[in-house]
Amino acid sequence: MEFINSHILSITTFVPLLTAIAVLLSPALSIARWVSMGGSIVAFLASLHIWFYFDAQTAGLQFTEMHEWIPSFGIRYIMGVDGLNLLLIMLTTFLTPLILLSVWHLDDKKQKAFLSLFMTLECGMLGSLVAFDLVFFYVFWEAMLIPMYFIIGLWGGKNRIYATTKFIIYTFVGSLLMLAAMIVLYVLHFQQTGVYTTNLLDLYGTSAEYSTQMWLFAAFALAFAIKVPMFPFHTWLPDAHTEAPTSGSVILAGVLLKLGTYGLVRFAIPLFPQATATFAPVMVALGVIGIIYGALTAWMQKDAKKMVAYSSVSHLGFVVIGSVAVISGGAALSAEALTGAVYQQINHGISTGALFFLVGCIYDRRHTRMLADFGGIAKVMPWFAVMLIVATLSSVGLPGTGGFVGEFLILLGTFLSSPLAGATAALGVLLGAVYMLTLCRKILFGPLENEENKTLEDLTPREFAYLTPLAILAVVMGVFPNLFLDKVRPSIENLANNFRNYKIVAEAPLESNQLLGADHKEMGH
């Protein structure tokens, strides 16, 4: 057991990469399907081990792994998990088998390549979540772009090349700025300590002049804001979602976008606390604008997939304002808002992932996503209607679903930070109900007039199999939120409570154990 605990993060992260290689070596597509599914299930079981053995009372890192990688430059192989990344790890490994099941029936010549790319993408996402060395993190961060580029570019819609090129340009520019900031931070730390290191835990204590910290924060925050994407850097997202295959849209909405908000909380805020306090009002304002803009734009869409895509801009605006909501004149983070942001990331992955799956189901049957082409199909697809309604209610934050818990905590914390921002963001909840219920009404209800809709097949057993876990989880997250919150609350409260200490780093650098709640050199489970 000690060996497993000492290497469980490496197992979880790299099993998908080994699976990707095995898929390419498989002699037949039928074998490749089982290999990819088997690898994704092993990764999920490994993440369950992390979940069940995770100490909910500990705020610091657990299951840590630390090995020398490039000693001459202070670059190390460092992995760890705490309450800030635990749920995202679980979401990643949970969604992957469901996505593979959704494409199980496809039988084109490139399907082996797709499965291999998708497993490589899972490795990149997990690595980005568990890496605690800046270079190590950056390798995974950039590696994610490659499989996603090909997934959209090879299996997307008619404008896929434009969409995937735009996606790469936006995210790569942001990544280059972040890389430049990492180099500056690396040099600053060496100048102050005489030690070369890219260990994030050590860099937390690096002091920087206020003006320097502002520029460094801006570079990191811009890279993460583009990934979210936060208004006004969102324009690549609707194109990418619309042109991506259903599986690509699900993983993009489910996990990839969350890496932007995770990066803000893990890197930008604790590394540059003074700049965070300065930029927070601007970021909250942009988040609120994104909420309202995304909701109004989604309401105007006639394409069901575009409507769900713009809803992501709106929903992730809530996550942004929850992540940077500061109170007491910028002296402290709001623990309630930050808890809601972490929780809403997961709910959004579940509910929006389900919505993209469902839009894909009707597109496979009708080869259209235009709302005007449907209406009344609840009469012939009752199980589809049930799943769409559950996903919709979770998306709009109905009490009893995960969406309510996340949005309520975010709005509660934001009101403490800025009553005006909280009240305006609350309007986004109302608008969300308007456009999502419009989606349901136009697809499910009304007269069944279109002859092609009268013979539509309801959900197949395979579709039912990958949609049911999402519907169940959406309800479980709403009814039993403490099942999840108890695991993450200590780490979130530690980050929020220590924000005041983070702000004095420039005057008196702190030790890593003060920042994380445990000595990282001795941490482990």
Image: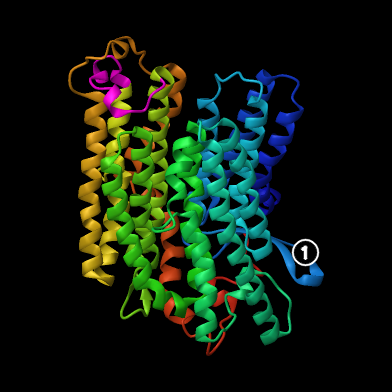
Q: How is the image coloured?
A: rainbow
The amino acid sitting under disc 1 is Glu
Front one among 213 and 415: 213
**Residue 372 falls within the magenta-colored stretch:** yes
Can residue 24 be seen? yes
Badge 1 crowding class, 10 Å Cα cut-off, few under 14, some 14 to 19, many 20 or more, is few
As drawn, 271 above or below 5: below
Residue 298, percent across and down?
A: 30, 43
Q: Considering only vertical position in the picture, is 61 above or below 40?
A: below
User: Does the magenta-highlighted stretch encompass residue 17?
Assistant: no
Give x and y (percent) for residue 389. Answer: 27, 31
Residue at the image point whose x is 33% and y is 23% from the top: 384
Q: Is residue 244 above or below residue 481?
A: above
Q: Secondary structure at mark 1?
A: strand
Q: Is residue 359 left or right of residue 140?
A: left
Res. 153 image quadrant: top right
Query: Which residue lies most toward the right here?
Result: 72
Left or right: 382, with 159 as reference point: left
Name the quadrant containing residue 465.
Answer: top left
Tell me the residue at 41%/56% (across/down). Answer: 342
**Res. 84 visible in picture:** no
For image coordinates 48% across by 36% down, the residue present is: 243
The residue wearing badge 1 is 68
Report the magenta residues as a range: 367-383
Q: Nearer the viewer, residue 495 or 186?
A: 186
Question: Residue 101, position in %: x, y?
Answer: 53, 26
